[in-house]
């Protein structure tokens, strides 16, 4: 295949969209689709190579994999070693260990599986791991282990490329169905990270390679409008998609098809071709692999040193550092090794395996030894951090069970006490985080609880995003149970302020209502249902929402030798956070609305730490420490209503 400058231009757009998205620029809320564009480009280029080699009977597994190693491993190795060194010096033990696990999983082409097990893509649990971006490299390598093998044997026994095209077409269609069926959710991000849901993105690129190689659709592909349409589809995806878009699901088809249109179009007389072949853009595309490798570790390191809001000058400095490191890596590592001919393929592959094994052994040793003697000698910092982020008791067995199983399930605090009054806590993840606060009252009454992440406890309100699962069904199951059970009090506890601030819920019947109207209507309907069924209820207002994750901010400050005292929410800001929900609730539930957090605020601010312990798990979920601190307040409120 002849060199195509427009493909390097396309690579540049892909990598720049990813970099700017990870920097946090709102105008490219869908910048993550750059990864999907990379998948399709990779499928096209590697697919063409495999197809042409098979057709000429020159395909060699050893040559193929050595080519991949030369292309990817040397530059990645430099980034891995540099990151390990920086993290050893500047980061606390827990983050150092997570980083080592990320490097090890990347070396073994399993980082997508590792990060799937860690949680989502946009969450705090993984966003500080500098190896997060390597999940896509693992997906590619898994594909290129499986794809050539299957193609080789199909071609060996059939002798015709058409059967390869047919088999891959079936795999692509199946992958789309799997991606839609297992769309990412709060329950599992398997539908984001794992290979089966990404096969169609790489596979469509390979199908484009078939079209080019076989010379199909010649007259169609000579039209410039084909390339321009593809260009527009990619930009629509970058601008319109955001964190709430179900992805990849069927939505990734938009940028992938756009990429395919650009790949298969032969026209050089169109607007998009002139843009994509701009020399500055082409150069960024040439070094795009190194840019992709460096951008996330640099961003993570910068965010650690400077977690506050960034200025334009800081963004410029970050960009300069990323591109300087990328150019140096490309010029002195990536390019020389890629074109190296000093070793035979088998010898090169043997060296790669040896280096990989050695590095994995070093990583294992560092993981065991850790860096605590350097960054946290007495273990105090890590102890405070781990205490703060610890999940509430029985979270795994109780939270989200109704949503996942689609059958009703409740848990009980302590042991059941026959003849004692019965209280049910109905909430979301905030309700779950609050459960330790009910420990004291559970010694006097039966406290049951049902909490579903992302599901506001109102019968007619559901989540806008499919990420949180089917909240409508979960809420209906809970309410059907409440109606038929003799509870003396129902406690609603949820992130009411967050749902309103981020406009992430709607009416379950119309699915078009804004969050404020949906909650207003939903609360009115819920109160009517409570009254109609003679159910007592109270509503616990949400606590303060901080700008930065409290444990991570503490970890940052303590690890860098600073006094932890800056992560606060002013009392006035906290009151403003809850104003809208309070105005909604006061119209029909003024006597049933309780704020258990405001009394812990001083005249000036609401604290994030108390007595040397942190009060929050992240930016808004209270820690177990804070929940236990609230036991007396919860007891007094519950007893006053029984």
Image: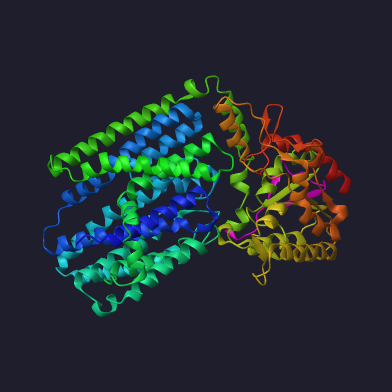
Residue 158 x, y percent position in the rendering: 16, 68
Q: Quadrant of residue 407?
A: bottom right
Residue 560 x, y percent position in the rendering: 55, 27
The outermost residue toward the bottom is: 219
Q: Is residue 22 left or right of residue 390?
A: left
Query: What residue span does the magenta drawing correspond to?
Result: 405-427
Q: Nearer the viewer, residue 262 or 241?
A: 262
Identify which residue is drawn at 68% across, 48% down.
430
Residue 60, compared with residue 635, is above or below; it is below
Residue 95 x, y percent position in the rendering: 49, 34
Q: Is residue 239 left or right of residue 538?
A: left
Q: Is residue 227 left or right of residue 387?
A: left
Identify which residue is drawn at 85% across, 53% down.
592
Identify which residue is drawn at 84% across, 44% down.
637
Identify which residue is drawn at 55% across, 23% down.
379
Residue 414 x, y percent position in the rendering: 72, 40
Q: Nearer the viewer, residue 102 or 284?
A: 284
**In the rendered picture of this protein, how many numbered marks are placed on residues?**
0
Q: Nearer the viewer, residue 474 or 405?
A: 474
Q: Quadrant of residue 34?
A: bottom left
Residue 325 is a magenta residue: no
Residue 624, compared with residue 43, is above or below; it is above
Residue 415 is a magenta residue: yes
Residue 29 appears in view: no
Q: Is residue 364 left or right of residue 24?
A: left
């Amino acid at each position: 295949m002849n060199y195509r400058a427009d493909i390097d231009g396309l690579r540049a757009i892909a990598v720049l969209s990813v970099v700017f998205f990870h920097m946090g620029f709102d105008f490219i809320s869908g910048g993550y689709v750059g990864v999907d564009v990379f998948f399709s480009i990779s499928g096209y280029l590697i697919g063409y190579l495999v197809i042409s080699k098979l057709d000429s009977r020159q395909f060699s597994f050893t040559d193929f994999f050595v080519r991949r190693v030369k292309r990817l491993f040397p530059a990645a190795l430099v980034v891995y070693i540099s990151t390990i060194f920086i993290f050893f010096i500047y980061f606390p033990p827990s983050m150092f260990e997570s980083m080592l696990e990320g490097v090890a999983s990347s070396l073994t082409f399993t980082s997508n599986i590792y990060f799937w097990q860690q949680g989502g893509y946009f969450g705090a649990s993984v966003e500080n791991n500098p190896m997060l971006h390597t999940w896509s490299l693992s997906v590619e390598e898994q594909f290129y282990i499986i794809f050539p093998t299957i193609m080789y044997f199909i071609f060996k026994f059939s002798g015709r490329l058409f059967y390869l095209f047919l088999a891959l077409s079936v795999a692509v269609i199946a992958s789309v169905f799997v991606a839609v069926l297992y769309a990412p959710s709060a329950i599992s991000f398997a539908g984001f990270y794992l290979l089966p849901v990404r096969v169609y993105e790489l596979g469509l690129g390979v199908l484009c390679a078939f079209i080019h190689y076989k010379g199909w659709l010649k007259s169609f592909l000579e039209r410039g409008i084909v390339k321009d349409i593809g260009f527009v589809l990619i930009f629509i995806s970058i601008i319109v998609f955001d964190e709430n878009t179900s992805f990849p699901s069927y939505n990734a088809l938009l940028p992938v098809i756009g990429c395919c249109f650009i790949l298969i179009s032969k026209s050089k007389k169109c607007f998009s071709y002139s843009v994509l072949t701009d020399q500055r853009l082409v150069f960024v595309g040439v070094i795009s692999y190194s840019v992709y490798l460096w951008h996330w570790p640099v961003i993570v390191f910068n965010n650690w040193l400077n977690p506050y809001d960034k200025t334009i000058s800081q963004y410029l400095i970050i960009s300069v550092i990323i591109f300087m490191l990328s150019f140096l890596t490309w010029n002195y590592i990536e390019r020389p090794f890629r074109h190296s001919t000093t070793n035979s393929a088998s010898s090169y592959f043997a060296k790669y395996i040896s280096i990989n094994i050695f590095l994995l052994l070093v990583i294992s040793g560092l993981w065991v030894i850790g860096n605590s003697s350097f960054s946290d000698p007495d273990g105090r910092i890590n102890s405070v951090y781990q205490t703060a982020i610890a999940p509430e008791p029985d979270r795994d067995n109780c939270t989200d069970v109704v949503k996942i199983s689609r059958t009703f399930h409740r848990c009980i605090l302590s042991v059941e006490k026959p003849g004692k009054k019965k209280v049910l806590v109905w909430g979301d993840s905030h309700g779950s985080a609050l459960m330790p606060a009910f420990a004291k009252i559970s010694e006097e009454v039966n406290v049951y609880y049902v909490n579903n992440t992302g599901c506001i406890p109102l019968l007619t309100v559901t989540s806008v995003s499919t990420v949180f699962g089917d909240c409508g069904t979960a809420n209906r199951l809970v309410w059907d149970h409440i109606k038929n059970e003799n509870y003396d009090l129902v406690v609603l506890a949820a992130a009411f302020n967050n749902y309103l601030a981020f406009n992430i819920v709607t009416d379950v019947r119309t699915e078009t209502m804004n969050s404020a109207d949906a909650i207003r209507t939903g609360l009115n309907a819920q109160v009517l249902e409570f009254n109609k069924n003679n159910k007592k209820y109270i509503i616990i207002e949400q606590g303060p929402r901080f700008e930065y994750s409290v444990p991570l901010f503490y970890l940052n400050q303590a690890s860098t030798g600073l006094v932890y005292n800056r992560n606060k929410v002013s009392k006035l800001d906290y009151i403003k956070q809850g104003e809208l929900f309070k105005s909604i609730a006061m119209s029909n539930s003024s006597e049933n609305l309780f704020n258990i957090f405001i009394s812990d605020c001083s005249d000036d601010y609401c604290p994030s730490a108390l007595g040397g312990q942190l009060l929050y798990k992240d930016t808004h979920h209270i820690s177990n420490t804070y929940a236990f601190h609230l036991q007396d307040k919860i007891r007094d409120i519950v007893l006053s209503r029984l």
